């Protein structure tokens, strides 16, 4: 039992790192109401850029910043495909993701770059989980605070309006093209940041890193919403909920691995987890609607 | 009704938790516990794991060792989670099968001995400058690198009139790129043009192979996991185009190649297991153990060689 508890801190650390990515997914999926599949590629881009820079001797904070900028660029490309070329959002995201595969390979000059904490000064590492947790919690709080302030500004509100009702926003004079650009760029910048943090934590950047990241992100968002719903509707609470959802997801993962359940079934288990978290509230709503005998409001 | 339901679920969860806790506590007398983390399900890697387990049970006795085998199903994030579980469980040794698994383990612990296997180049995998064959610290292992210059020479021995060689590999695999670079240099030194043909995953294999077959005299395929998985397709395309291939390992050769300088992944795993037994018994310290290699055999595929009309010289064994 003690060993199980001992495996939790690293699971929580992984939860916080992927929570940063999930915040990026939250911005496009919930706020902008766009299913942005670019994130699978952007995670690796952030990791690749950060890894290559750190190995070349660049200051690690600067490497994080440049990785975030790379993510912002990726978001701009998706925006270009979607808004200027008129390609549907999902497809635009997939196209950018495909492009990023090649770009990431070129950045890393290969499929993999090692950034071991023993040889380079990184900000956090799996070798020292308590310090990593301190760094990650501070990062999470800073991100939540900055986003809370940003989405309270006028531009932030126009982004929220665009996601809520695009046609009405345009009727009110909001430039929805601009808001989508800011939203996509911001989201992918944050996802790239999470990739950069992840590559430092696990000590390497690999071309296969981002595969299935969108599913992890969506799962975290949805689990978080289900858990936080009772606590409050405050935006900051919702953002914190995304981190909570991600931590829960990774604790479940670690539990499955720890109790030696068949790892082949891991992907099916995560899908079932998301299905349960989505399905149970929906069924509850259906049942309560039936009892009152009226139309169920969505 | 809702409250009763919640109460029942809570009781079931508690009960199962207690059962698990009890079963963990009853693990019994001191045994060596070895955690095996493998990146993906794959013939060669599976063979290495089998060889490893056999060697350890041969040397230590099946009753004195427990294996915790975990497969990351191709997901590098899983490697981190799996290794974290091993560290929390305080295993006595970690066997990391393939590069991402080794990297994850290397970054998770400085104290638990880590033996890598099916890793081609340790210096590249671990970001070590001036790698001299011994990693040191808590890491060692075995490498699946066959002497690449001998492999490249095999192309020239069997097909002396070769002008262009097509290097076919998957761009997502770091090991493949390393082998391709070394072979490319060797061939250039012998005055043969080598051109790279890379596919990003199993979907592009046909298209890229067809182009490579059309533009080259001979194809070279390194120890590439994706190529191994798609070897049958590659084989049909090459036979159609009547182009021969030299493969980096026996599995690929048996489906699409003429000859190979083969290592057996089972033997590689077995050698790793022998190293593990020495470390666990305290006979050797891991920081002093250099990376070990498996012995190589020249092998050829009779069916494909006959179909293409290639005469195989002395010294080659037939692949069964």
Image (spheres, rainbow, N blue to C red):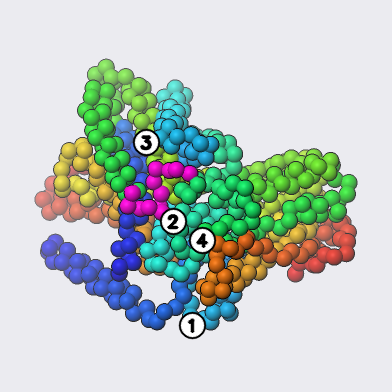
Which of discs 4 and 1 lies nearer the camera? The answer is 4
Residue B138, which numbered label?
4
Q: Are marks 1 and 3 in contact (CB under 8 Å)?
A: no
Q: Is residue B139 magenta?
A: no
Label 1 secondary element: helix
**Mark 2–mark 1 CB contact (< 8 Å):** no
Disc 3, SS: helix
Q: Do dots 4 and 2 share one subunit?
A: yes
Marks 2/3: CA distance?
A: 25 Å
Which residue reaches farthest top? A173
Q: Nearer the viewer, mark 4 or mark 2?
A: 4
In the picture shown, does residue B118 fall above or below B219?
Answer: below
Bounds of the magenta span? Answer: A120-131
The residue at which mark 2 appears reads as B108
Q: Is residue B308 visible?
A: yes
What subunit carries mark 4?
B
Q: In the depicted view, which residue is nearer to us: A100 or A138?
A: A138
Q: Which residue is mark 3?
A: A190
Q: CA distance from mark 4 to mark 3?
A: 35 Å
Q: Which element is circle 4 on?
A: loop
Residue identifier under label 1 = B63
């Amino acid at each position: 039992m003690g060993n199980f508890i001992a495996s939790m801190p690293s699971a929580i650390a992984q939860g916080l790192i992927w929570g940063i990515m999930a915040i990026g997914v939250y911005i496009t999926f919930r706020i902008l109401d766009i299913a942005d599949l670019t994130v699978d590629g952007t995670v690796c881009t952030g990791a690749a850029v950060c890894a290559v820079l750190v190995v070349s001797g660049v200051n690690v904070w600067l490497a994080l910043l440049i990785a975030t900028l790379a993510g912002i660029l990726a978001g701009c490309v998706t925006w270009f495909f979607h808004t200027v070329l008129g390609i549907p959002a999902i497809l635009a995201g997939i196209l950018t993701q495909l492009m990023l595969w090649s770009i990431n390979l070129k950045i890393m000059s290969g499929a993999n770059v090692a950034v071991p904490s023993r040889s380079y000064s990184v900000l956090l590492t799996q070798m020292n989980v308590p310090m990593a947790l301190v760094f990650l919690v501070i990062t999470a709080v800073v991100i939540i605070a900055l986003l809370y302030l940003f989405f309270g500004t006028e531009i932030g509100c126009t982004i929220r309006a665009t996601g809520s009702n695009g046609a009405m926003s345009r009727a009110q004079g909001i430039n929805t093209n601009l808001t989508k650009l800011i939203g996509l760029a911001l989201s992918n910048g944050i996802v790239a940041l999470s990739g950069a943090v992840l590559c430092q934590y696990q000590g390497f950047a690999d071309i296969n890193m981002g595969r299935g990241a969108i599913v992890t992100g969506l799962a975290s968002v949805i689990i978080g919403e289900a858990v936080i719903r009772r606590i409050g509707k405050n935006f900051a609470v919702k953002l914190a909920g995304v981190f909570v959802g991600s931590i829960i997801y990774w604790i479940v993962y670690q539990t499955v691995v720890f109790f030696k359940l068949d790892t082949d079934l891991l992907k099916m288990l995560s899908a079932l987890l998301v299905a349960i978290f989505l399905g149970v509230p929906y069924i509850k709503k259906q049942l309560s609607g039936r009892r009152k005998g009226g139309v169920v409001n969505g | 009704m809702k409250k009763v339901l919640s109460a029942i679920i809570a009781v079931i969860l508690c009960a199962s938790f207690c059962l698990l806790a009890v079963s963990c506590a009853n693990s019994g007398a001191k045994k060596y516990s070895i955690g095996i983390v493998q990146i993906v399900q794959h013939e060669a890697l599976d063979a290495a794991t089998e060889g490893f387990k056999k060697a350890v049970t041969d040397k230590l006795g099946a009753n004195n060792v427990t294996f915790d085998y975990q497969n990351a199903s191709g997901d590098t994030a899983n490697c981190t989670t799996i290794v974290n579980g091993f560290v929390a469980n305080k295993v006595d040794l970690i066997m990391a099968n393939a590069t991402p698994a080794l990297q994850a383990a290397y970054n998770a612990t400085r104290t638990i001995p880590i033996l890598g296997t099916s890793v081609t180049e340790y210096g590249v995998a671990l970001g070590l400058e001036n790698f001299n064959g011994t990693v040191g610290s808590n890491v060692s292992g075995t490498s699946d690198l066959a002497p690449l210059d001998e492999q490249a020479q095999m192309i020239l021995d069997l097909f002396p009139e070769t002008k262009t060689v097509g290097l076919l590999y998957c761009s997502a695999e770091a090991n493949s790129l390393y082998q391709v670079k070394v072979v490319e240099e060797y061939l250039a030194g012998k005055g043969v043009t080598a051109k790279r043909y890379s596919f990003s995953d199993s979907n592009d294999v046909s298209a890229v192979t067809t182009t490579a077959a059309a533009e080259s005299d001979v194809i070279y395929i390194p120890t590439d996991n994706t190529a191994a998985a798609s070897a049958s397709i590659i084989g049909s395309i090459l036979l159609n185009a009547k182009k021969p291939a030299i493969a980096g390992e026996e599995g690929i050769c048996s489906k699409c190649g003429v000859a190979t300088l083969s290592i057996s992944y089972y033997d590689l795993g077995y050698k790793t297991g022998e190293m593990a037994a020495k470390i666990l018994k305290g006979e050797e310290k891991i920081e002093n153990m250099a990376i070990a290699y498996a012995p190589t055999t020249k092998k050829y595929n009779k069916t494909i060689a006959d179909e293409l009309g290639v005469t195989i010289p002395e010294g080659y064994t037939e692949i069964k």
